[in-house]
Image: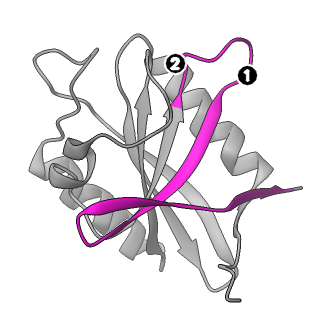
Amino acid sequence: MVTEAALILPRRLVLRILAAAQNSAPNRMGGVVGHDADGPVAFMQLRNGAPQPETQLVHASGDIQAARFGLDGRGLGLWAYVVSYPASAAEPKAEDFRNSPYPDALHLVISLSTKGVLEMRAWRRLGTEPHECVLKIKD
């Protein structure tokens, strides 16, 4: 039986990502996680320029390019694309992968609609369907 290795995120990075999602509420939030040889180390939030930011997530192409240059300039690769949902589950919607600037990247999906505890789950696209990945937090 083959089991998928867990994806590991440092707690301090998880807290930064979740804080950005909370601070963006009631609007949706997006961003990127960069990694070095040791794993994920940085988070960069992207602006949401959607006409209805509570339910839509749209980034200007200049913001996406700036994020890539920012990661490249620090010698980091793209580890994941992050999206938040202020009022729904931490499950990707069809448009998350279709409209993502990084459709083949790992997607971290955050739900703010839980009672008292935020939820973050990891997803990869396999073919046209999302596949959940095991996500663990380390201290």
Q: Position of residue 68 (x, y in %)?
A: 30, 66
Which of 97 and 49 lies nearest the eye of the viewer? 97
Label 1 CA crowd tier, 10 Å (few <14, some 14–19, many 20+): few
Label 2 CA crowd tier, 10 Å (few <14, some 14–19, many 20+): few
Q: Is residue 88 left or right of residue 4?
A: left
Q: Position of residue 98 (x, y in %)?
A: 16, 53
Quarter of the image with the C terminus in it: bottom right
Q: Is residue 24 left or right of residue 57?
A: right
Q: Position of residue 72 (x, y in %)?
A: 37, 75
Write down the quadrant of residue 129 in the picture. Answer: bottom left
Write down the quadrant of residue 54 in the picture. Answer: top left
**Three-letter amino acid code of the residue under disc 2:** Asn
Write down the quadrant of residue 96 in the picture. Answer: top left
Q: Which residue is mark 2?
A: 23
In the picture, the disc for residue 6 is none
- Magenta residues, as a range? 111-138
Residue 131 vertical placement versus 117 (above, below): below
Which of 62 and 132 lies nearest the eye of the viewer? 132
> Does 125 appear in magenta?
yes
Q: Element under label 1?
A: loop
Residue 8 vertical placement versus 110 (above, below): below
Residue at x-position 61% and y-position 33%: 18
Main secondary structure found in the magenta portion: strand
Q: Which residue is mark 1?
A: 117
Residue at x-position 58% and y-position 40%: 17
Compare marks 2 and 1 and give the one earlier in the sequence. Answer: 2
CA–CA distance in space, label 2 to label 1: 15 Å
